[in-house]
Amino acid sequence: MGIDKINPVNNNDYVKINKKENVNNGNVIEVKISDAALDKMELNRIMEIVKSVPDVRADKVLEIKKKLEDPNYLNDRISETAKRIMDSKIIDSFDT
């Protein structure tokens, strides 16, 4: 059992090349690129830009590491979170 190609690409659908005779300069080649080919080129260009962007923003990672190294930052964040929990209605639901 074999697997056949799915929807093969026919390059003739994307590019039309016509050769014409020009009396002054000899042969002239005219190339017409289809809208589908232009769209595909644009998509490929965008994909290359997306691929070039790093997955991790090193500047943000460095910023967070610096914050975590400061013990006051952690204490402040824990205190703020605890205060929000105590002030919320969630605690009231446990009293019943």
Image (cartoon, rainbow, N blue to C red):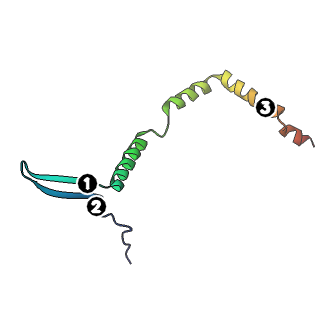
Q: Position of residue 64 (x, y in %)?
A: 58, 29
**Which residue is most to the front?**
23
Question: Which tag is nearer the camera, tag 3 or tag 2?
Answer: 2
Q: Which residue is mark 2?
A: 11
Q: Of discs 2 and 1, which sits in the foreground? A: 1
In the image: residue 86, left or right of residue 45:
right
Vertical position of residue 66 compared to residue 4: above or below: above
Q: Which mark is residue 84?
A: 3
Q: Which mark is residue 32?
A: 1
Which element carries disc 3, helix, strand or loop? helix
Vertical placement of 30 versus 51: above or below?
A: below
Toward which corner of the image does residue 18 lie, by quadrant? bottom left
Res 92 quadrant in image: top right
Percent coordinates x, y for residue 62 in the rendering: 53, 28
Q: Nearer the viewer, mark 1 or mark 3?
A: 1
Quadrant in which the N terminus is drawn: bottom left
Left or right: where 83 falls relative to 18: right
First in sequence, mark 3 or 2: give its number.
Answer: 2
Q: Position of residue 43 (x, y in %)?
A: 39, 49
| Residue at point 71%, 24% (across, down) | 76
Mark 1 is on which residue type? Lys
